[in-house]
Amino acid sequence: MAFQPIVDVQAREIYAYEALVRGPEGQPAGWVFEQLRDGDIYHFDQACRVTALRSAARLGLHRQGLPTRLSINMLPNAVYEPANCLRSTLRTAQEVGFPLERLMFEITEHEQVGDQAHLRRIIDTYRAYGLTTALDDYGSGHAAAGLLLALRPDVLKVDMGIVRGVHQDAWREALIRHLTHFGRETGLLMIAEGIETVEEARCLLALGITHMQGYFFARPGFECLPEVPGEVFDQLGR
């Protein structure tokens, strides 16, 4: 696993670390997915959850003073029955001492969601256990408004395709301003993905986005928990 921080800019702290699957020599996620065969998806999803939890615990994430979360990508079509599929996750979390309220599961768009009602049942089950759910890559591929309305997660991660160059594009600014307003009205936490420049980060902060992720803050660290230098926060003001 590689880990990339999700930053609360306003609080100047790390909100969560997203666990990103890698090959045995650090190959990217795309390479890993190419190795999968038909029928492997359920076991792969389960293995990634357990590996992410064990790796994060080995690195001491669950012992950090701040309540930093661990964010794990979830393949929704691999979850045939929510409670049963959670068993190994819950068992591993208990074994390594990782509090359930500090776990977040990101619904990824690796494949189109076939049954939105089933996925909503998954979210409701996870929430009953105290787990946080997020819709990843919003605005890209299948992660659109209809899916957001059907699922009603706790967190919305705005795709880098919307975020990139926001400080130079009035349309992008208007769309993100609309999303932040929607988030305030519904209690939905907004996270902007793919931040690469200080100008993007400053513009997003001015628009009301306080949680961000991207190379501007830190690149994913292979089997480590990257820190965000204080000077990065300093560039954004207080």
Image (cartoon, grey):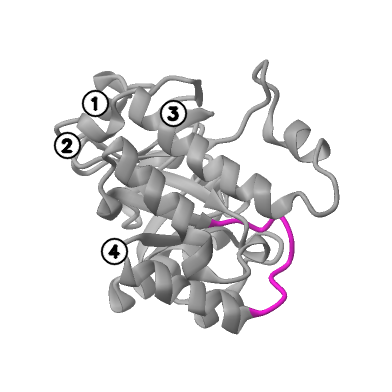
* Disc sitting over residue 55 in the figure: 3
The residue singled out by tag 4 in the image is: 130
Q: CA distance from mark 3 to mark 1?
A: 31 Å
The residue singled out by tag 2 in the image is: 66
The disc, 2 or 4, on the residue closer to the chain's N-terminal end is 2
Nearer to us: label 2 or label 1: 2
Q: Say which residue appears at 36% left-offset and 41% top-offset.
A: 202
Amino acid type, mark 2: Leu
- Compared to residue 108, the image places residue 237 above or below, namely above
Could you say where residue 136 lies in the image, as x and y percent from the top left? 54, 56
Q: Is residue 14 left or right of residue 182?
A: left
Nearer to us: label 1 or label 4: 4
The disc, 1 or 4, on the residue closer to the chain's N-terminal end is 4
Q: Main secondary structure of the magenta part?
A: loop
The residue singled out by tag 1 in the image is: 234
The disc, 3 or 1, on the residue closer to the chain's N-terminal end is 3
Check residue 131 for magenta coloring.
no
Q: Quadrant of the C terminus?
A: top left
